[in-house]
Image (cartoon, rainbow, N blue to C red):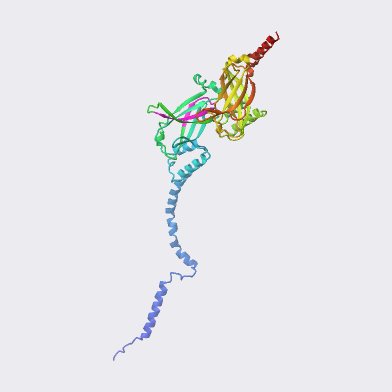
Amino acid sequence: MMKKTRHTNPLRMIALLGVVLTAVILFAGCGKAPQGEKTSAREVATKTPAKTVIPVKTPEKQAVKTTTTEAPAAAQGILAKIKAVDDFVKLYALQQENEQGGKQSDPAGQAFADKWETLTKGMIPRTLTTGLDFLAVSTKATGDKEYTFSFLFRATADLKTNYHLNVYGTVCAYNAKYLQENQREDLYVQWNCYLTNEPTSQWKVGEYRVVQLKVDTELIPYSLRLDLVTRDEQLKWTGLVSLLYLGWQWDVRDEKSFLSKVEACSDFATLHALAPTGPQMSALVAQAVERKWKTLTANLEPQTMIDGLDFLAIHTKATGEKEYTFSFLLRPTADLDTDYHLSITGKVDPSFRQYIKPTTPGGSFTTWALLLYSDPMSQWKAGEYHVAQLRVETKTIPFDMSVILQARDAQGNWTGNPGNRIALGWQADVSEQAQHGLAASKSERTRRKSAKTR
């Protein structure tokens, strides 16, 4: 019996194949949500392991963050120090200590540059020589009998020469007693400042330099003069390049003791010897000094010498057996821009002509030139009190005095007497008056009157 052959319907096979393909496609796409559909909470939970890739990297990122914050922390420390600095001496010392001080590319270097610009704003450069400017001086009492003078310079061009400094400190006549015997006549001290350890030929253009000079001295005011000089290899002086007058410099170490001295001052000449106009002072000292100036000048009547400058008073003191010190008090009412000096005339009673060197033969008056190079008028500011002192060798007799300004050219030659002559009347030291001055003058006048009546 023959088996029947089973024939497969082609249509059924095609339909079956389509079912199988559909099942495969659905199975392959079951793990992915269609675009635009919301993911269910279950699907979020199943995807969470994939997102844990970020927490896995956290330790690596934390390590990187920790190492990068250590450098900023150190930088923040130096930046805070730079910000806190309030004077050029401290800034220079900090810059020298900091290894990054000269790197303008890093934050510290830029901070130093910005701070220098802030602290030197308003400073007027004064040229010492081509390529070298002087900017400022700072004076600090760094011991009971020690001053430290700090001079700020800036190179504006390459310097080929190794310069050095000479510093002269002039004192007022009342403070001559604090100088050595051989210095008292000229009223000044000279200090040499050798720059062998920081040769100027190595100074970089645009770089700020601070040169310090420590001196053993009583803490008295000095009017400073700065000389730029050249020296040979043995440091012997070979020449003066230029010089600058820096005005009065002083500082206070014991404020309580100093304020007591200020309060005890009974005349402006003594106050000037203690606290002349010039350097920056603490608020407490500045207020005490200003208050004392106002007290001592309250009843004075200003007399105009020229527009912008008033004469206030004269004080006369015998500072030796044959020596007078005349102190002239002046006050600018406007900033001055000219360096005037003073011409003083002293007239004596005819009976005392033998005690003077008359300006004209047989005359009864003499004249003195009081040069103010150590306290240049061009640096005087409106409202300041300035005292000019003239010390003369003379018998302590009365002088009928007057004063007028004196003009000189750059070579020091007299060029005129501008402004008004101020009559000062008869001057003598009251403590010496009875013994040498008015008593002798009165006796001589009485003798002459008696001779006439005979």
Where is 395 relative to 2, above or below? above
Residue 409 visible? The answer is: yes
Residue at the farthest right position: 453
Between residues 207 and 225, which one lies in front from this camera angle?
A: 225
Q: Residue at x 57, y 27 (%)?
A: 342
Rendered location of residue 383, percent (x, y): 61, 33
The quarter of the image holding the C terminus is: top right
Residue at the farthest top position: 454
Q: Chief secondary structure of the magenta span?
A: strand
Rendered location of residue 76, percent (x, y): 48, 44
Q: Is residue 208 magenta?
A: no
Residue at the farthest bottom position: 1
Where is 136 relative to 218, above or below? below
Between residues 118 and 36, which one lies in front from this camera angle?
A: 118
Q: Is residue 217 magenta?
A: yes
Q: Residue at x 48, y 25 (%)?
A: 190
Where is 173 relative to 109, above or below? above
The quarter of the image holding the N terminus is: bottom left
Start and end of the magenta stretch?
212-231
Rendered location of residue 254, percent (x, y): 56, 28
Where is 181 relative to 124, above or below? above
Q: Say which quarter of the image contains residue 6.
A: bottom left
